[in-house]
Each structure stands twice: as C-alpha cells, then as structure tokens.
Amino acid sequence: MSDPAGREGLTVVGVRHHSPACAGLVRRTIERLRPAFVLIEGPADFNPSLGDLALDHALPVAIFSFRADAQGSVASYSPFCAFSPEWQALVSGRAAGAETRFCDLPAWDPAFGERRNRYADPHGARAEAAERALAAALGAEDQDALWDALAEAAPEAELPARLARYFDLLRPPGTDDPAEEARERFMAAHAAHALREAGGRPVVLVCGGWHADAIRRYAGEADGTRPEPAEPEAGMRAGSFVVPTSYPRLDRFSGYSAGMPSPGYYERVAADGFAAAADWAFDAISAALRGAGQVVSTADRIAWAVHAEGLARLRAHPAVLRADLIDGALANLVKDALDGPPAWSASAAVPGHPALLAMLRALSGTREGRLAPGTRQPPLVADVEERLRAAGLAPGPARHRLALDWAEPGDRPRAHLLHQLLILGLPGVSRSEGPDLAEPGLPREHFVLAPHPHWLGALIEASQWGGTLSMAATARLAARVEAAPDSLAVLAGALSEALFSGLAIEGALLAALDRGLAGAHDPAELGAAGRRIVRLHRFGTAFGEAARPALARLCLSLVARALGLVEAIADPRAGLDALDLLIACRDLFRDGADARPELASLRPPFVAMLGRRLADPQAPPALAGAALGFLVACGEAGAGPEALRRLRRFGLPDRLGDCLAGLFALAREEIADEATLASVEGLVAAWGDDDFLRALPSLRMAFAWFPPRERERIAVAILRRSGAGEARAEAEGLAWMRQRADPLDQAEALAREARVAARLARYGLT
C-alpha cells in the first residue's frame, strides 16, 4: 500500500472510522510489516499522555480535546471502540514493538475552526455525486448500505484494492483540499520524520481515507524535521483527556456523525461475523419493539428472517447485511404507513415513527465506557470532588433528596455549590423545587442527587471552562451571554444563575441588562425578564450586600421603561403580553421593599399613567383590567362597587375575558370575592349561547390565574347561587374540576347540537 509518489517504506492505510473491516486491515498490516512507527490520526498534543490509553479501560472511550479563552470554548472528540481502526493501530502497534504516536494537529489549532468532530471528512458535492453513482451501480440505497457491500463484506484479499478505488472516487489522486491542507501536511511531516528515524524499517500511518493520497504526496515533499504542535496562544487554556463514552454517543445517527451507525451491531460483526450479528439483531430489535408495546410474534420473526435472506440473495450479498436486516424488519414488523423515508435511506432525517426509532436504538446497543483507575484527570475533577466531600454531598450509590433553606447559615454555601454544578449541566444533579416567581423572603430549595454513568465524563468535559468549579461556572455563563448578548431572557437568566451560585455579578452583565431594559420594545420579553429581576430583588440580602443596590438599579430601569411602554400599547394581544410586566411593577411597588428615592418618585407618575389607561375607552381590555388590578393591589383604588362598575364597561363577550385576565393577574386575592363573582355571573347571564361560546376561551384563560383549589371554591359558589344544596355543590364542584373532557370540546359539542336542532326545526323535523 505504499505509493511511488510518497516515501519508500511508508504505508498509509486509509480507513472509515469505526469500521470493523478497516480495523482488521490495520491489524493485519501492522502484524505483517512489524513497523518501527505506527502513526495515527489523532491530537498530537496527547502524545505525552499516551500511557493513559494503555490502561485497562472498558471501551468505548474518547480523547476529549479543548481550547478555551475569553471568547469561548471549542471542543473535539476522538472516540475509540474495540473495532475502531485507530484503536487497533494502538493495540497492534504496541504488540509489534512499534512506537505509536498521534500525528494530527492539536484541537486549538486554527485549522480546525469551529469543527466539533475532528474526524469528519469534508465531502463536497463531487464526492457525494460519486458516492450516489457508485451506490446506484451496486444497487445500494444509501452510504451505509454501500459501505457494507463494498467493504465490510469484502474478502480480505480484495479489501485494500476496493478501499483504494473507493477513496480515489471520492477524492481523485492529486487533488488538494485547501480546508484540510494544514492538517495533511502536518501528518505528512510526522511520516517523513518517522521514516528518517526508522532506520530502513517500515512506517504505517492510519488516517481517514479522504486524507490518504494527500499525505503520501506531501510526505514526499517534507524534509524529515519532526513537526511540533504550536503552543496555545497567551490567555488560552487547552488540554486533552480520556473520557468514557457510550455506543449511543458513538452512533452516527444519534451522536458522532463522522463514524458508523449501529455500533452494537458492528461489535458483533467484528467479533463473530455477519451471521452471529444478524442473530443478535433479530433478538435486539424484537425485544425493543416488544418493550415499546408492539407484538412481534414467532411468525413475524420467521417472515422477517426469510425476507432478509431473500433480500441478501437478490442484492448479491455474501451474507445478510445490516441493510437487509432493517429493510426486512420494516417490511414485516411496521404495520402502518410512514410519513417519509426511514432514517437509513439516502436523504432522510432520523424518523419520527416509534418503531423505526426503537430499531435504530436497538442496533446502537447500550454499552457504556468506563475509565481505568489511575487515568489522568483535569484539576476540575479533584476540585469538584473535594468541594462535594467538604459539603457532605459526596455522591453515593443511592438517589438522595436534599432540602436547603437559605436562612440556615450552613445551607447557603451548599446551595451555591449545587447551582454551580447545574450551570455546567452535570448529570445526576437537579433542582426539583425552588422559590416561586412572586415569593418574598429567603429561598427554600430541593435538589436531587443521583448516581449517573456519565457523571465523570461530563465533569472532565466541563474542564474546558476552567480548572475550578467557580471558574468553570463563571466562564460557562459568560459564554451564554456572549452567544446572545441582546437577549433579555439570556441576560436575566445569567444574572439569576450567578446570584444563586454565589458568583460575582460582573459590571459587563449589569450594563448589558441595563441597556436591554432601557431599550426593550416587546412587553412580553421585558415582563419575563422584569419578573425575574424583581424576584431576585425581593430576596433582600440573600445574595449579599453588594448585589442589592445593583438589583435596585435594574428595577429602576425596568419601571422607567414600563412607564413609557405601557402608555403606548394599543393592540389587544400586546395588552395580554404586558401582564407579566405589570405584575413585576406591582410586586416592586406593593411590597415597599426599596427605599431608593428614585424609585419612590416613579410611583405617582406610574399610578397616573395606569389611571389614564383605565379611563381610556380605546385601551385593550386586558390592559385596562390589569391597570384596575394594579391600582387595587397597591391600595390606590378600592375593590368595592367602584371597581365593579368599571368592570361592567367591558361586559361584551369579546372583551370581558381579556379584562378579567388582566384583573385577576394583578389582584386575584384582593378582588375574588362573592360580589365580583356575582357581577361577572350577571354579565354572562345576559348573553346568548353563541356569545357565551365565543367568550369561553378567554374566560377560561382569565380563571386560569386561580390555582385549582380556588377554582374549585368558585365552582361551588356558582352552584350554590344557582340553587344547589351544600352537599351537591361540593360534589359537583369537585366533579367539574376533575372531569377529563376538555371544556372547549364540550362547548363545541353543545354548539353543534344547537345547530342541528335549529336545522331540524327549520324543516319541521322536530
């Protein structure tokens, strides 16, 4: 497999990643040549730590490489399983006494750009066209079926020639790829240096087939100097560590797009051949479908096996291949029509059909990797483990529920720790309960800590953000803000997470939030962010004395912007969207929690503005109702007859529901009494059936502001006023609350019955 255009003694083995056939070819090549060096496409900066890969890991594992600076973080993965060509190169190279090295650029090199999968070969339009033509010539429907027929099922003696021809079709010999040239010249320079050091012994280089010809050519141009990876730029953090991974993450359909599909299936192909793999697939798919509730009878399975064998013969396959298995399963086990082609066909995405998803997951397998003791780990792992141990939160074998009260001195640091873990998205840590948006006082929270197989891998991967937990959490939040600097939701969320995590809130974040609040035009976006900011402010000194004045300044900006924005709202939909914004301002003014004179001075103009909106006959009903609710809740207006008189202005079917929604959103507790309910009932009683049905959706939205227990109380009150006795009202009210039929569906049914009755009466049929 040497190339006259390259260096004498160099054998470049072009492979498809995670291909059993290519893994076998690599192993046989190394055993036959007994080379001095085995070079492998992989991060060269990991070479000083190659001993980590020689430990007794349970595969699959991956090399996780990252670079990170103030602008963000970029990570890449180099995964390995037992049938990966690169893993076989490592194992066989060590067994043959060769010096094994990775020869690709490190992850922080600019040549990689923002690429996540370093192995992903950049097949262009020409390569795709060549692959489609070859698939059509061989009667294969997609890339994976083509690969199986061409390579996985090839006789060992024919495989090298087939692969060479296949990769030449994708990228003709002598073709340069500007996007990959830096990587290919770096790998070629490693090859030239190894040849110079080999003393006449062979050198084997294993790489993706896309690169093979270029590396041979560039090796002939290199001077034999050993290339050294560039040092990370100043201020950049970089590293490479072994992490455990899993077959679902390795699967091309669900995780690592540069590899092969169905690693569970190909593990059996590599170990025992196609016949044993087919038997395993029959069992795995049948069990998965039965677990999903589908009946797979013995007759179904027999028909499936016969169909798959027939397809294999028809397609001239030497054995039942993966495409034959899944096409046979599709024909015999999926009984209903599909909305589109299945995922394994050429141009389709992962399917939505549950049976097809179950098949793919079954073929993927469930194997989880595990690191051997003594594997090198980043500083973040030790920092997190020590902090958890010191806080008495070291993970155990059982699921643990933890209640924390910020009023307790010992609970607050533990809450900070757990929130920092949540920022990093570490599995096994979740917040099950926390303070309501409108709850004043110190927070009380509930967390769940549970063992998780991906904990260690996720923690190692989180090291891209920093070497300590607080550093990593801060950098992760900064990256979120950097990705969406104009999003009020992201900025307010980052502020909340920083405060709950005990992290310092930076001036840049506060300045961005202040600008965002002052320039907001969407009342819904401003209201969602505002409610969160006001909630944080209402927690008082829970987040430290330094945070309180900063939050007060944000609240001041919020009210100042709301003052102008609410005044200009004319659209009914925008009136509904403004409810959260008015709730945030109500909470701020009603609680009297801030003594800042600037905020106190805004109350009179704010109250006056809402008075104008309430008196304006053109005001959106929801906004008018919210204005009335604000004035009542903040003690600026009474909840008695005057409020009910104003309510009757909006008694028409297309206005009452929105008005009540605004009123109940702002003053549910103050105004939800018998007099209010009687007034609403009186307005509704004057409507006809059509009017009531038209108003029903908005009325339901209005009463949705009441919690279930209060809605039940209202139902009982309505029943009692209609003449039902105490016991009957209680029973029917409870039944109303627990009925399964959607009230809107019931209303539609009643409306149809009325239309049918009217039509029958028109023709004298009743």
Image (cartoon, rainbow, N blue to C red):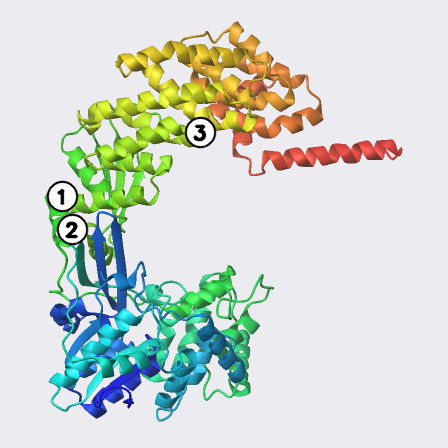
The answer to whether residue 283 shows anywhere in this view is yes
- Residue in view at x 15 percent, y 82 percent: 194
The first of marks 2 and 3 along the sequence is 2
Mark 3 packing: few (<14 Cα in 10 Å), some, or many (20+)? few
- Residue in view at x 63 percent, y 24 percent: 654
The first of marks 2 and 1 along the sequence is 2
Indicate the amino acid at tag 2: Gly
Q: Position of residue 302 (x, y in %)?
A: 52, 79
Tell me where residue 173 sits by quadrant.
bottom left
Q: Quadrant of the N terminus?
A: bottom left
Q: Which residue is mark 2?
A: 235
The first of marks 3 and 1 along the sequence is 1
Instruction: Residue 674: give its label.
Output: none
- Residue in view at x 85 percent, y 31 percent: 761
Separation of residues labelled 3 and 1 (CA atoms): 47 Å
Q: Nearer the viewer, residue 561 or 422?
A: 561
Separation of residues labelled 2 and 1 (CA atoms): 35 Å
Separation of residues labelled 2 and 3 (CA atoms): 38 Å
Mark 2 packing: few (<14 Cα in 10 Å), some, or many (20+)? few
Vertical side of 689 occupied by 235: above or below = below
Dot in front, 2 or 1: 2
Q: Secondary structure at mark 1?
A: loop
Q: Nearer the viewer, residue 356 or 745?
A: 356
Q: Which residue is mark 3?
A: 521
Q: Secondary structure at mark 3?
A: loop
Indicate the amino acid at tag 1: Gly
Q: Which residue is mark 1?
A: 392
Q: Position of residue 356 (x, y in %)?
A: 49, 65
